[in-house]
Image (spheres, helix red, strand yellow):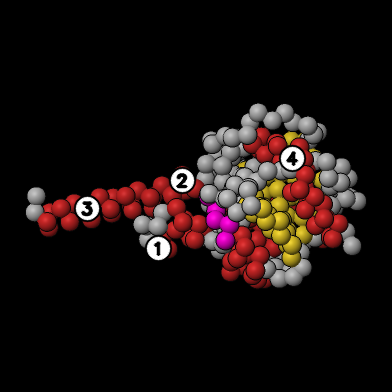
Amino acid sequence: MKVSTLFFSIVLVYFIIVAFMYFNQRKLLYLPSENNYLDDPIEFKFEEVFIEVEKGLKLKSWLIENDLKNKKTLVFFHGNAGNLSNRTYKLNQMSKLDLNILILAWRSFSGNNGEPTEQNLYNDAHKTIEWLNSKGVKNDNIILYGESLGTGIAVELGQTNNFRGIILESPFTSMENAAKNIYPWLPVKYLLKDKYNSERKIKEIKSPILILHGEKDTIVPFHMGKKLYDLANEPKFSYFTKDDDHMMKFDENLINSIKDFLSFNAQ
């Protein structure tokens, strides 16, 4: 085989792979059927509610209600994989805190219809806050909790609204940077549809922030969470650990860091 023919074949294969990644990127980013952490029994009482995010589309959510009018409400934006039940082990611990919790399932997740995209998820999050507002819950009594992909949505809302607080678990600086970490051989900048550029937006947030991240994160490098912390405005807090991977252990230490953050926000 001639060198020119070999070179052409390699280039052709590369462009086929690039084209495949471009047209299938959202199938690779949003993984509603991936299920982990399904063995944990539910130790909290919740109401299944459906929040209308656009005409003809209502999204399944779980509401752990203590007292919507008088206690703070934590809104949980989950990551890019799995269903609501995959967060049971976290909710079991969070439900012991003195708050209300609302966890939303994104479009196409947990049996919901619709297509997940960056703009669609932003819309779903905004509509969720509006739904709470309609129940008498004001933004200054709402704490946003973003998990992985959900950190990008929490940052998006936080840059234009003042909330009681924002908690980011295993956050990335931008989807471009996160994708480059996994696919360094792809021209990610030119292919990516959903940007989630948190490092640009976080400087606009005026709400108190708590960032949780483990140094052994194999999906979103720890330095991304550290960079967001450095960029964030005061008041800001961190819970950085040596041993946690991407899905952090919801042990006493992590819960205490959330309690301390809530105590600060109660002042």
- Frontmost of labels 4 and 1 is 4
Label 4 SS: helix
Amino acid under label 4? Leu
> What is the spatial separation of the Cα atoms under label 1 and label 3, in whole angstroms?
20 Å
Q: Earlier in the sequence, mark 2 or mark 4?
A: 2
Q: Which mark is residue 91?
A: 4
Label 2 SS: helix
Asked where in the image residue 64 lies, by quadrant, the reply is top right
Q: Residues within 10 Å of mark 4 (few under 14, many from 20)?
A: many
Q: Which residue position is annotated with label 2?
A: 28
Residue appearing at x 71%, y 71% in the figure: 233
Asked where in the image residue 205 lies, by quadrant, the reply is bottom right
> What is the spatial separation of the Cα atoms under label 1 and label 2, in whole angstroms?
17 Å
**In the depicted view, which residue is nearer to us: 129 or 177?**
177
Q: Say whether marks 3 and 4 touch (CB < 8 Å).
A: no
> What is the spatial separation of the Cα atoms under label 4 and label 1, in whole angstroms?
38 Å
Asked where in the image residue 173 lies, by quadrant, the reply is bottom right
Q: Which residue position is annotated with label 1?
A: 190
